[in-house]
Amino acid sequence: MFFTVIGVGVFCYGVFYSILLCLLDCDLQLAFYEKFGKSVRRLQGKVVFITGASSGIGEHTAIALAKHGIKLVLTARRQAELERVKQICITSSGGKLTNNDVLVLPMDLLDFNSHKKVFDLAVQHFGQIDILFNNAGRSQRANWEHIDMTVDKELFDLDVFSVINLTRIAIKYFSTKGYGHVAVNSSIAGVVGAPYSGTYCGAKHAIHGYYNSLRTEKLGTDLQLTVSVICPGPTFSNFLQESFTGTAGQKYGNTTVSTDRRMTGERCGQLCAVTLANKINECWLGVFPLIPFVYVAVYFPVIRDIVLKVFGPKRLFKLRDSKDIDLSEVQAI
Ligand SMILES: NC(=O)c1ccc[n+]([C@@H]2O[C@H](COP(=O)([O-])OP(=O)(O)OC[C@H]3O[C@@H](n4cnc5c(N)ncnc54)[C@H](OP(=O)(O)O)[C@@H]3O)[C@@H](O)[C@H]2O)c1
C-alpha cells in the first residue's frame, strides 16, 4: 500500500511537471521568479550597461528596464539606432528617466582597445555601473565541414572574446566596489548542439565555460559577484539577416515572418529584465516545444539522443528557423 501511494504520487508529480513545462515559455525557476520573485523595480537607482542595444533582444531589455526607471548605458555600432532606442526608453519610462539617465556610447566590440575607454566613460557619467549585460552577438547558418576558419575566428572574436574582454574590465571595476553583476546572452544553442550552426554553438558553449568558471572562482571571495547566463531560443530580431555563414564576409540575409514559431522581442526583453532583477545564474527561454525539450536534453541525455535521432537535423532545423532547410543553399554558403 505504502509503495502504491508513493508510486501514484511520483506519477502525478511527473504528469503535472510535464504539463507545466509545455505551458511555459521559460524554465521553472525563471517562471517562479517572474510570478513570485523580486520586481524589476528593485533595480531602480542602478545602472545597467547593455551591449547590442540598437536592436532585437538588447533593445527590448533596455525598454523593459527603462519602464521601471533603471538608468542605462546603450552601446552598439549604429549610433542613430541607439538614439532611437534611447528615445523609446525615455518615453516608456513615463517620466522616470530624463535625457541624462540614458547614455548612448557607440562602440564596435571588435575594436578591443576601445572597451576600457567606453566602460570608463560610462562610469564617469553615472559614477557607477551595477550590471554589465553582454548581449551583442551574431548567429550562423552553415554546413559544418564547409566553414572557413576565418569565420570561426571572426565569430569567436565577437561572440566570445569581446564578451570576455569587456567582462574582465567590469570584474576589475566591480572588485574595487566589492560587488557587481555580469550577464551574458548565450542561447539554447549553448546548451544543446543545434545543427547547421557549428561555430555559433561552439562559441555559446564556450561562453558557458568561461562564465561558469568565473562564478565558481569568486565564491567566498571579497567580491560578491552575480554571474547570469541567459539562454533564449528562437526570438524575433534581425538575427537571421545578420548571421554568419560558412564563407568569410558573407551574411545569411534571411528574414523571419510573423507566423514563425518565435518568442517576441518584447517578451524576451521582459524575461531578461526579470533574470537580472532576481540574480538568476542560468535560464532558458523559448516557445513550445523548446522548454520541455531542453529539460529532456539536460536531465535525460539517453532520451535526448533518441529524440535527436528520430527527429533528425532537418526537422530540428525547421523547429529552430520555422522553415525547411534548403540543403543546397547551406551547402553553397
Ligand atoms: N534572436 C534569436 O533567435 C536569438 C536566440 C538565441 C540567442 N540570441 C542572442 O541574442 C543576442 C542578441 O541578438 P538579437 O537576436 O537581438 O539580434 P540582433 O537584432 O541582430 O542584435 C544584435 C546586436 O548586436 C550588435 N552588434 C553586432 N555586431 C556588433 C559589433 N561588432 N560591435 C558592437 N555591437 C555589435 C548589433 O548592433 P549594431 O549592428 O548597431 O552594431 C545589435 O544591436 C545575441 O548574442 C544572440 O546570440 C538570439
Image: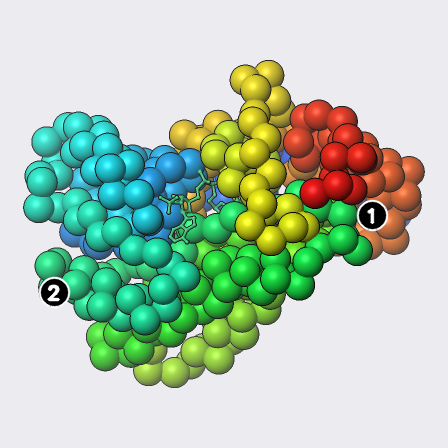
The residue drawn where x is 66% and y is 31% is 321
Q: Quadrant of the C terminus?
A: top right
Disc 1 marks a residue whose amino acid type is: Arg
Mark 2, Cα crowd under 10 Å, few <14 / some 14-19 / many 20+, is few
Q: Position of residue 46 (x, y in %)?
A: 21, 54
Vertical order, 109 against 4 (above or below): below
User: Which of labels 1 and 2 is toward the front?
Assistant: 2
Establish whether ligand 1 lies closer than 8 Å to the Cβ of label 1: no
Q: Is residue 164 left or right of residue 196?
A: left
Q: Position of residue 80 (x, y in %)?
A: 24, 37
**Residue 8 visible here:** no
Of 305 and 113, the residue lying toward us:
113
Q: Is residue 43 left or right of residue 164?
A: left
Q: Which mark is residue 124?
A: 2
Query: What residue is disc 1 on?
Result: 304
The residue drawn where x is 61% and y is 22% is 260
Label 1 and label 2: CA atoms lie apart by: 49 Å
Residue farthest to the bottom, as pictured: 221
